[in-house]
Image (cartoon, rainbow, N blue to C red):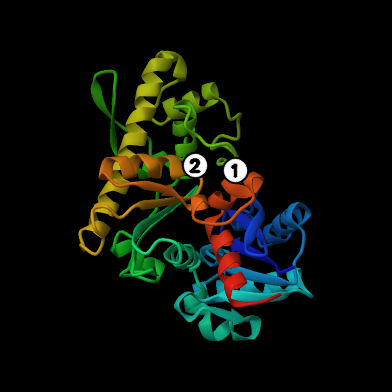
Amino acid sequence: MQKIIGWDVGGAHLKAARVENGTVTKAVQIPCPLWLGLGELDRAFTGAEAAIGRAPLNAITMTGELCDAFATREEGVLGLAAIMVRLLNPGRALFYAGRSGFVGDREVADHAIEIASANWHASAALTGTRARFALFIDMGSTTMDIIPIAEGRPASLGYTDAERLAHGELVYSGIARSFLMAGPKLVPFAGRWTPLMNEWFATMADVHRILGQLPEGADMMDAADGRQKTGAASRARLARMIGRDSSEADDAAWEALARFFAEAQLRDIMDAAALVLSRGILHATAPVVGAGAGRGVIRELAARLGRPFIAFDDLIEAVPEARSKACDCAPASAVALLAAAQFSA
C-alpha cells in the first residue's frame, strides 16, 4: 500500500495529511507559533505524528520561512528543511518547489526561492488536475490565496509573495488571526464614525465568534488578551477596540459592529478577486473552488460573484471522517496527492 504524508510548515500552524493509495485518510492541524522559537516545530511535529503516524515518503511545503526567527527567506527555507529532515529520519523527504516540482533534501539550497511559500501553488496545481478552469481561493487563519486556474494549470501573474501581493493573488486577511486594527480605520457605533485603537485588542476570530460563524477548530491561538474564547469575552475584546467596555451597549450593538468588520473583510476580498478576474481568462461560469478554514466566507464570495461554489474536498478522494480537515489543510493534502501521483513509496 502506497503511504505518503504531506506537510505544510507554516509560521503559526503545522498541517499534515496522510494519503494511502491516493485517498486522504487523516489530516491534522497543530499550533506551531514559530515566532516563539524553532523548538515549536519539534513540539508540533510530535503532536502531529501522534495523530497521523509515519510514512516512508513525505512531501513538504512551507510558509514558515517568513517568521522572524530567520534573517532571510532563503535562510528560513534551509533551516526548516533541515529540521524536517531530522524529524522525519529515516523517512524520505521531498520538498515542493512549485514550478520545478519536487526536489530532494540535497537540492533544497538550489531551489530555496522556489520552495519559499509555495504551498499555494501545490493546492492550485492539484485543483487544476480536477477543474480545468476555476478561481481557486484558500482562506486560512491569517491569509488568503486567490489563484485563477486556466487550462488545468495555475495562471497566476505572481509567484513570490511580493509579486502575488501586488497582483491581488495574496491577501493578508484570514478567518482567525487577522488583527482588527489592520482593517477599516473608522467604524460606525452609536450613530457616529469611530476611530479604532491601534492595538492588538481583538482579532477576526472574535468577530466570527460573535456572529456564530467561526468554524470549529479554526482559532487555535491564544486570544489577544489571553482570556476565554466565549461570546462574552469576544464582545469585551471588540469593545476595547473602540475604547469601551462591553457593558456600555447591548449584545445587538456589538453584533452589529462585528457584522461591519465581517463585511469590510469580505469587501477587501471582493476587491482582490475582482482584480484577478479582470484579466478575463475565466468565463463567467467558471466555479470558485474554496479551501481552508474560512471556506464559508468563500462560499459567500462565490454567491456575490454569481459563480458556482465547489469545496476543495469535493475534488479530492478522502474518507468521510477526514474530508473536512483535509480541506482545512489543503496544501498538505495537495502535496501528498501530487506526490502520490508521481512517486511510489
Q: Along the polypeptide, which appears first: circle 1 or circle 2?
A: 2
**Is residue 295 left or right of 219 when viewed as pictured?**
left
* Amino acid identity at mark 1: Met
Q: Is residue 234 above or below residue 150?
A: above
Residue 175: x percent and y percent? Answer: 46, 42
The picture quadrant where one finds residue 105 is bottom right
**Along the viewing direction, whichever of 104 and 128 lies nearer the viewer:** 128
Residue 4: x percent and y percent? Answer: 68, 67
Circle 1 sits on which residue? 221
Do the numbered discs 1 and 2 sit on residues whose CB atoms are within 8 Å?
yes
**Is residue 264 left or right of 220 when viewed as pictured?**
left
Residue 302: x percent and y percent? Answer: 33, 45
**Is residue 89 left or right of 313 when viewed as pictured?**
right
The picture quadrant where one finds residue 240 is top left
Circle 2 sits on which residue? 176
Q: How many marks?
A: 2
